[in-house]
Amino acid sequence: MNRLPEFTADVWRRLRHEWLWVYCGPVPRCDVWSAEIPVPPGVFFVERGEVRIRADGQEIVVPRGQAFFSAPGLRQHWFAKNTRLLSVGFHSAWPDGSPLFRSGLNFAAKSPKLRLATLVLFRRVHRGRKTVAFRESVAAKALSLAGWAAHEAAFAAWFAVFIETLHQHGVQAESRAPASRRRVDQLVAWLNSRPLDQSVPTLPPGFALGTRRADQILQQHLGVSLRVFLERRRLNAARERVVSEHGTLKEIAFTLGFRHASHFTAWFRRHTGVSPSAYRAGGLEAA
């Protein structure tokens, strides 16, 4: 097995990490396919039951005792009755928003070492509890500074084992050339920080480039126009909020820049093929 690739401290500091959840518990809906929902990278272990995944044009069966290594993107879930999962979700991305791991994922395999590390993470984060459902694991919480430091340290220790496990399966991090991508990284990071209800924003003076040049940079490096980039960003946010938030669809529509819920519904249906309410019904309990 080849050694893990090495990165300088400067490259490591450019990465953005967000630990989303670790939970262990039963799934809420069984024997029904979810809607096609956006998921972050991560892994889940089937502690009991069976899971089926539709992603990348294939259907993958994950039996009890195996783990599924998930790529970021859209997928569907099906859970057998009484299925219980041990799961971790996170975001780890370069400044332009592209994930650290993408290629080679969406596969099932046994991984005893990573499962043990995940159980250790679960116990540290949830202080020895045996069961925590997904909804509880993603709920907002407050910790002391020492508590947050311990929380970050626990995830970092788990992430090291996760990276080693992916390496053993031939999955490597997506590399980026810092010098050649500095401008596009700055541009994309700034665009991702803008309110979702904005169309094409006016770029700040510090960028020393106009909207036309920004469009050219995105076309060259990412293969999309500025308008398409912003539309995709808003659509991804709409998918996530419709599924994960408890607010009304009208409230979600307003935060995304739609004055009328009917306009949001038409826009969402045009891009996904279903209405927001149907999407929510199919995906609300799929996570």
Image: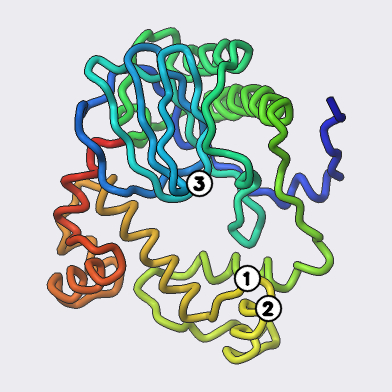
Where does residue 115 sit, x and y in percent of width and height? 55, 14
**Res. 220 mark:** 2
Tell me where residue 134 sits by quadrant.
Answer: top left
Q: x, y (%) of residue 262?
A: 13, 73
Residue drawn at 79 percent across, 50 percent down: 11
For the residues marked 3 and 1, what is the alpha-carbon distance in whole angstroms?
Answer: 17 Å
Q: Secondary structure at mark 1?
A: helix
Q: How far across and how far down the image is residue 48, in percent?
A: 35, 12
Residue with the mark numbered 1: 222
The vertical placement of 62 against 129, above or below, is below
Q: In this view of the protein, which residue sits in the foreground, 37 or 243?
A: 37
| Location of residue 71 in the rendering, given as x and y in whole percent from the top left corner | 53, 42
Give me the residue at 67% from left, 22% from top: 161
Specify the amino acid type for callout 1.
Answer: Leu
Type of amino acid at the residue the image marks with label 2: Gln
Answer whether labels 1 and 2 touch (C-beta < 8 Å).
yes
Q: Earlier in the sequence, mark 3 or mark 2?
A: 3
Task: Rate crowding at label 1 as few (under 14), some (14 to 19) or many (20 or more) other CA atoms within 10 Å.
Answer: few
Quadrant (top left, top right, bottom left, bottom right) of the C terminus: top left
Rendering quarter of residue 104? top right
Q: Seen in the image, is 200 located left or right of residue 114? A: left
Q: Which residue is mark 3?
A: 72
Instruction: Say what secondary structure mark 3 lies in.
Output: loop
